[in-house]
Every structure is written in structure tokens, then in C-alpha cells.
Image (cartoon, helix red, strand yellow):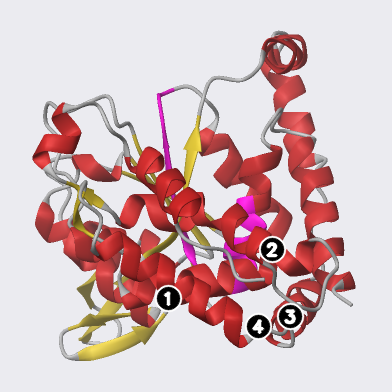
Amino acid sequence: MSAAIQQLESLLMRELGRVVVGADASIRALVIALVARGHVLVQGAPGLGKTLLAKTLARALGGEFKRIQGTSDLMPSDIIGIHVFDESARDFVFRPGPLFADVVLVDEINRAGPKTQSALLEAMEERQVSVERAAFPLPADFLVLATQNPREFEGTYPLPESQLDRFLLRIDVDYPERDAEKEILTRYGGMFTAAQAIMEGVAVLDRSLLTRAREEAERIHVADGLLAYVLDLATASRQHSRLSLGLSTRGALALLKAARITAGLRGADFVTPDDVKEAAIWVIAHRLVLTPEAALEGSTDIDVVRSLLAETPVPR
């Protein structure tokens, strides 16, 4: 049934795997985000290949890649663009900022101030930016990959719940397994020219494959029982004793979309509870806000998602 979705994952696994080692789960999450037209928050310690993953994805898609470094003095105009006076035209013309790329990496997004973070909201949700009462559309496959280090707190501005909710998925990048790390050292421990040659060997995907994958995802059936299961998970999160903020309606929609694509990745034309469970960690965790008591006890958002999945009855 879902040949295009499976083919898309296979090709991205192959091409991104040429450069990024041991990131199969992250690449699978990126496939879900691409098909669902969603944005991705990548969380992990520095030096684990988050930037490399984004650059390789942009190359495989054949799109323009831009990197924005989050700093406390970063202004909205630095990412959106500004109007400058054109002497030849005798008028002000708009000069687009780095946000007008196909794949935009916002590195250390939690180091940018609230004003700049809020400037991303319209771009991520509406796929356009407004400057001087004029709206400028962004590329059709506009994708934001934002990174943050959860272990750094000095000089950071935690993302507001409204912006976290705009990210379809959150990928938690951990240290690689020993064999994978050995492969990284072997592959990139030589000259820099070798690393550049590996990146240049990444093939560009046919964009029509992505279009077919999206069409197939829309045809995947969701039974009423599965809709009820997603609603039960959302309701349980809103009533959970360790949460002060549960899953929003946008979050429930994101979970349903991700579950459909997950079903397509295994070649099915219908969604099962296991598809919902597989997507739940990526989709739900970053949308939850723990109570102060739960945070002090050492609970994490992932722990709560796992408890929700364990406690919510699964439809037959």
C-alpha cells in the first residue's frame, strides 16, 4: 500500500547514512516530519551531530540550507530580513533573511530572546512572514530544525509552550553506541577533505516521491476506535497528577498524523495502537509541563508519556 513512504525512508536512510552514523531513529522521525510538513526540535548535548544531520537532510532534499545561531542579541530582523533602500530603483526593497531557506537550522534556539523566538511562530505555523504590512511566502517544503541543549541553563530562555506546540516532533539525541562512535572516528578521523567528499556524495531525492508519500499518508485509514484512543491519551494527560499542562488539540492532531505515517512506514493501509505508541514519545513529550513536585522528584516528560501509554486502555 505505502510504497512511496517506505521508499522515501529507504532512500533517506541510505543517503543520510552516508554521512551520519547511528541515527536511524532520528532519520525515521525526520521522514515523519517531512511527510506531515512538520517542524522538528532536536534536543541533546553539543557535538552529537545535530547540525550535520540537518545539513545532510537539506542536501538530500536538494534545497537551500541556512543556519541561524541563537544568541541573546539576535533580533527578529536578523532572521526575517529587512527593507533597504535601492539607489537604482529609488525605493525600499525587501532583502530576505535566512528564514527563507528550504531547511533552516536554528542552533541553540533557547539562547535567542523571547522577541526573536516569537518571530518564528508565524513562519512555523503560517509558512509566511509579515514585514511592513506585507506577507512574504516561505518555500513550499519549509522545514525548521531547532536544537537545544537541555543541560545548559545560564543565558537561556526556555521556549514558551505556544512555540513548543508548533514543533511536530522532538528528537532526543543521546551519545552513540560504542560501535557507532568507533565508525565515526574511523570515517572522520582523517583529513577534512574526506568529510567534504562524503557530503558531496549524497544524492538528491526526487521531490515527486515526497508528494506521492503525502498522498498515500492521507489515504491511510483510521478507525473510530483509534480516534478514541488518541482522545483518551489526550484526556489522560490533562488529568495526570504529575502534569500542570497536558496535550493540546494541536498535539492530538500531530499524534494522529504521525501515527498514520508510522503505519505507512510498515506498509500498512490502516493505523494500529502500536503505531500510536511508536509516535507518542516524539510527539507528546515536549508538549507536557511537569508540576514542580514531579520535577523535584526527578520525573521526566518521557517518563510521564510512558506511564500514559501503560495506563490508557488499548482498543481491540
Horizontal arrangement in the rendering, residue 22 relative to residue 55 (left or right): right
Residue indicated by mark 3: 211
Query: What is the x, y in percent for residue 200?
Result: 77, 40
Q: Residue at x 23, y 43 (%)?
A: 110
What residue is pinned by disc 2? 262
**Does residue 1 show up?**
yes
Q: In terms of secondary structure, where does tag 1 sit? A: helix
- As measured in the structure, the alpha-carbon distance from the residue carrying label 1 to the one carrying label 2 is 18 Å
CA–CA distance between discs 3 and 2? Answer: 17 Å
Q: Does residue 38 belong to the magenta stretch? A: yes
Q: Position of residue 75 (x, y in %)?
A: 15, 55
Residue on which disc 1 sits = 231
Image x and y of residue 144, in percent:
44, 59
- Residue at 85% x, 74% y is 2
Establish if 267 lies above or below 219.
above
For the residues labelled 1 and 2, say whether their Cβ atoms are less than 8 Å apart. no
The amino acid on which the numbered mark 3 sits, given as a three-letter code, is Thr
Of circles 1 and 2, the one toward us is 1
> Which residue is more in the foreground, 217 or 75?
217
Q: Is residue 195 magenta?
A: no
Mark 4 or 3 closer to N-term? 3
Nearer the viewer's eye, disc 2 or disc 4?
4
Asked where in the image residue 189 lies, by quadrant, the reply is top right
Q: Quadrant of residue 93?
A: bottom left
Q: Residue at x 73, y 67 (%)?
A: 263
Identify the residue at horizontal 40%, vertical 41% (top origin): 302
From this view, report whether residue 56 is shown above or below residue 184.
Answer: below
Residues in magenta, as a range: 29-46
Q: Residues within 10 Å of mark 4 (few under 14, many from 20)?
A: some
Labels 1 and 2: the sequence-earlier one: 1
Closer to viewer: mark 1 or mark 3: 1
Label 3 or label 2, whichever lies nearer to me, is 2
